[in-house]
Image (cartoon, rainbow, N blue to C red):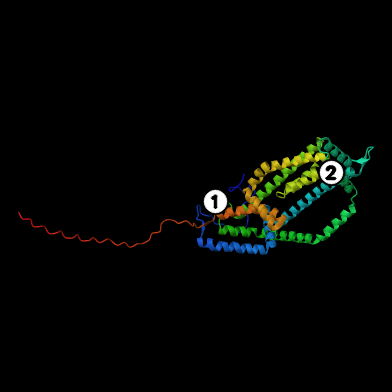
């Protein structure tokens, strides 16, 4: 059962958990704070202009603090849950972060072991496909597949399309490629990107430190907001609303990734079992995990998730790549028309046009990282907008009615009637 206001049952109002928080209940039907017209006309535009100028000047710092705030809001319910067990808040924060780090490390190790093992098998199969000669023709499987594709094109009146020569050259280039050359290029790339990696690690450490400070002061911040704007009966305070909005987004995104990843894995396994895509039943788990991970990237994720399985199918058996491509096209259609509207629509409660604008704006302002942060930030902004809308209102610019004006009215003076004409003498 959820709490009033649509919050999950495990969310508790922070003022009940933070010691020393004194909240005065708001009277039912308390009037809103009215913003005068002159502030709307002059003050708000100046404030918005100043905020935008400052945010543009220190965009990197603003972005880091926004990410840290999102992490703090996401972990604060867990910290409060430990606080109800009489565990000091500082120690609760340490436990949450260490547990989160341990879970990430275990997941990376487990997934990494599966990826390395199956990637090694896939690499061996691709190497055999390109290099091992079979039969009396002394052709590799790749060369025979190219010949079969050319024969199929010739039989169907497409003999003008000559893929045999280009296909043989492509296979030869792959077979004769020097692994040492690619290794050297990779090392040079890593050396050139060393500074960027250092900056990324420094930003990550800074985000963690800032989020810890925010978690330590989250209680005092929530209590201060509640003292200034006491929650109405049946309505939550600001911090639980932000946490609920962020939790709804994370829950919807994880559910969406799980649905698409499982669908892709099961579909590839079925294709491999039926013999329509050779080897897909063996690597269905690997490709399904990749698709689920890429689904976390908005809009680009579905296409990035389809690239490895389609590429593998194209190398092993070009005909099977058609079935794999059709599978992912079907998954994407179901995702776009059924899964996303049902899952993310209820999680964000935002208009699709606003979601698209937020993603484009996030990418324009801060690249790929901005795309990641755009949707959870929009969810929190929506909760903040609802909170402000319940407590503030803009003074109306409409005229309230006719304004009485004193007007002096002079009474008209009556003119005296002219005397009647004298009567005429009539002689008999």
- Expressed as whole percent of the image width and height from the top left, the position of residue 184 reads 87, 56
Inter-mark Cα distance, 1 to 2 = 64 Å
Residue 22 found in image quarter: bottom right
On screen, residue 361 above or below 264: below
Residue at figure coordinates x 90%, y 54% from the top left: 180
Residue at figure coordinates x 62%, y 62% from the top left: 51
Q: Nearest the camera: 57 or 87?
A: 57
User: Furthest residue to the right?
Assistant: 136
Q: In the drawing, what numbered circle is on residue 315?
A: 2
Q: Nearest the camera: 209 or 379?
A: 379
Residue 129 found in image quarter: top right
On screen, residue 266 above or below 239: above
Image quarter (top left, top right, bottom left or bottom right) of the C terminus:
bottom left
- Expressed as whole percent of the image width and height from the top left, the position of residue 206 reads 73, 61
Q: Nearest the camera: 94 or 345?
A: 345
Residue at figure coordinates x 65%, y 50% from the top left: 355
- Expressed as whole percent of the image width and height from the top left, the position of residue 386 reads 58, 53
Q: Is residue 40 visible?
A: yes
Are dots 1 and 2 in contact, CB under 8 Å?
A: no
- Expressed as whole percent of the image width and height from the top left, the position of residue 179 reads 89, 52
The residue wearing badge 1 is: 233
């Amino acid at each position: 059962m959820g709490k009033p206001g649509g919050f999950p049952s495990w969310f508790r109002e922070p003022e009940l958990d933070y010691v020393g928080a004194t909240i005065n209940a708001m009277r039912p039907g308390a009037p809103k704070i009215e913003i005068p017209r002159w502030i709307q006309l002059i003050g708000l535009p100046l404030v918005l202009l100043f905020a935008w100028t400052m945010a543009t000047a220190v965009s990197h710092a603003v972005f880091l603090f926004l990410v840290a705030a999102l992490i703090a809001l996401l972990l604060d319910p867990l910290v409060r849950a430990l606080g109800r067990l009489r565990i000091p808040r500082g120690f609760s924060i340490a436990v949450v972060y260490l547990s989160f780090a341990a879970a990430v490390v275990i997941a990376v190790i487990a997934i990494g072991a599966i990826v390395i093992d199956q990637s090694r098998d896939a690499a061996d199969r691709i190497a055999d496909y390109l290099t091992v000669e079979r039969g009396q023709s002394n052709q590799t499987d790749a060369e025979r597949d190219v010949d079969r594709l050319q024969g199929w094109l010739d039989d169907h009146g497409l003999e003008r399309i000559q893929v045999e020569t280009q296909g043989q050259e492509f296979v030869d280039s792959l077979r004769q490629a020097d692994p040492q050359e690619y290794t050297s290029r990779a090392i040079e790339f890593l050396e050139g990107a060393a500074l960027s990696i250092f900056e990324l690690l420094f930003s990550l450490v800074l985000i963690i430190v800032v989020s810890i400070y925010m978690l330590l002061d989250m209680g005092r911040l929530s209590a201060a907001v509640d003292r200034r704007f006491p929650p109405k009966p049946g309505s939550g305070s600001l911090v639980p609303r932000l946490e609920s909005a962020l939790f709804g987004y994370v829950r919807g995104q994880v559910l969406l990734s799980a649905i698409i990843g499982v669908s892709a894995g099961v579909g590839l396994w079925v294709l491999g079992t039926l013999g329509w895509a050779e080897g897909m039943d063996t690597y269905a788990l690997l490709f399904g995990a990749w698709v689920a991970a890429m689904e976390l990237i908005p809009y680009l994720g579905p296409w990035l998730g389809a690239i490895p399985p389609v590429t593998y199918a194209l190398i092993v058996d070009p005909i099977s790549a058609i079935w794999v491509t059709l599978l992912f096209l079907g998954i994407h259609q179901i995702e776009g028309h059924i899964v996303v509207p049902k899952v993310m629509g209820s999680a964000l409660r935002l208009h699709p046009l606003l979601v698209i604008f937020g993603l484009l704006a996030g990418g324009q302002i801060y690249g790929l990282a901005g795309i990641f942060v755009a949707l959870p930030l929009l969810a929190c902004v929506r909760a903040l907008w609802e909170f402000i809308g319940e407590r503030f209102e803009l003074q109306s610019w409409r005229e309230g009615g006719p304004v009485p004006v004193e007007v002096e009215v002079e009474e008209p003076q009556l003119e005296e009637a002219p005397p009647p004409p004298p009567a005429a003498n009539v002689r008999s």
